[in-house]
Amino acid sequence: MSQASRDSLAQLHTELKATLSAGGVELGAELFAALKVIDENGALRRSITDPTVEANRRQELIRKVFANKVATNTVTVLQDLAGVRWTTEREFGDALEEMAATTAIYNAEQGGLAGLKTLTQQLLEFNRVVEASHELQRALTDQQAPVSSRGDLADNLMSANALNSAKLLVRQAVENPRGVKPVDLVRRFADLSAQQQRQWIADVTVARPLQQAQLDRLAGSLSSTFGRQLQLNVHTDPQLIGGIRIQVGDEVIDSSVASRLNDLNTKLAG
């Protein structure tokens, strides 16, 4: 995906997070179904990605096509996607696919970090089972077999306690892999789940080891700040000299002496 399209997708993730989080696997399933319709209809796909057509007209077309077929929040996500310019038609589909997968991942995240870890593990376990059997690989990619039959086979390969999110993502990868191997798409979904786990982990770097009481206070403060119970990974780096550096996902809090000295040197050099 081009950088411009990746930036658009990142912005949409931020704007639509509440909708995606509340939608559950039902929203994810409807977004995947809409993706299939768009992938199979070239005229529709071109119309909703044509940069010469005004955004509101592209969004109105989405409403006309999907309003009576899917839930309101599904139409909202589709319209927001259509309102953004994408470098290629394929990138629109890739963005929609990622949005649908993210909805399923957010559903697993209701169980906190443990829920995300379980989702990632179940997706990777499915791949291990499939990659260990050439017969299964052929069966899951057999274009002569009905799509639903391949999906049912994928369901049967999942464990009895598999998350609904895992079942949805695996079935999507098998029934509509969009030109890649199902196991490769499942691995991509697992990577997205693993990335979301980073939002629950605080990588803490300090100049000297912290006492347990200090760690407890830090954990409580960070969990209060970020609104979730973060897991701390603490590293010691004497080069920090003093202070602390914290990273949660892409957000960095750096109050180390080394960082302040570096900032000062940069200003002096300027």
Image (tube, rainbow, N blue to C red):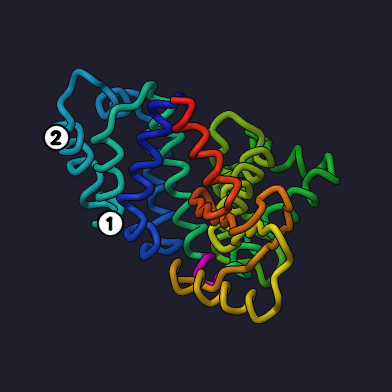
Q: Position of residue 266 (x, y in %)?
A: 49, 32
- Specify the quadrant that holds the C terminus: top left
Q: Indicate the amino acid at tag 2.
A: Asn
Toward the viewer: 99 or 43? 99
Q: Is residue 111 left or right of residue 61?
A: right
Q: Which residue is mark 2?
A: 56
Q: Is residue 103 above or below residue 81?
A: below
- The residue that appears at 72% across and 58% down in the rendered structure is 235
Q: Position of residue 242 (x, y in %)?
A: 63, 57
11 relative to 217, above or below: above
- Per the model, the C-alpha gap separating discs 1 and 2 is 17 Å
Judged from this view, the residue extending furthest toward the bottom is 213
Q: Is residue 245 magenta?
A: no
> Which residue appears at 80% of the width and 43% of the height?
131
Name the chief secondary structure element in magenta: helix
Give me the residue at 29% from left, 26% from top.
49
Disc assigned to residue 73 = 1
Q: Position of residue 178 (x, y in %)?
A: 54, 33
Q: Going by the image, does 227 lie left or right of 200?
A: left
Extreme residue toward the top, this view: 52
Residues drawn in magenta: 108-112
Residue type for callout 1: Asn
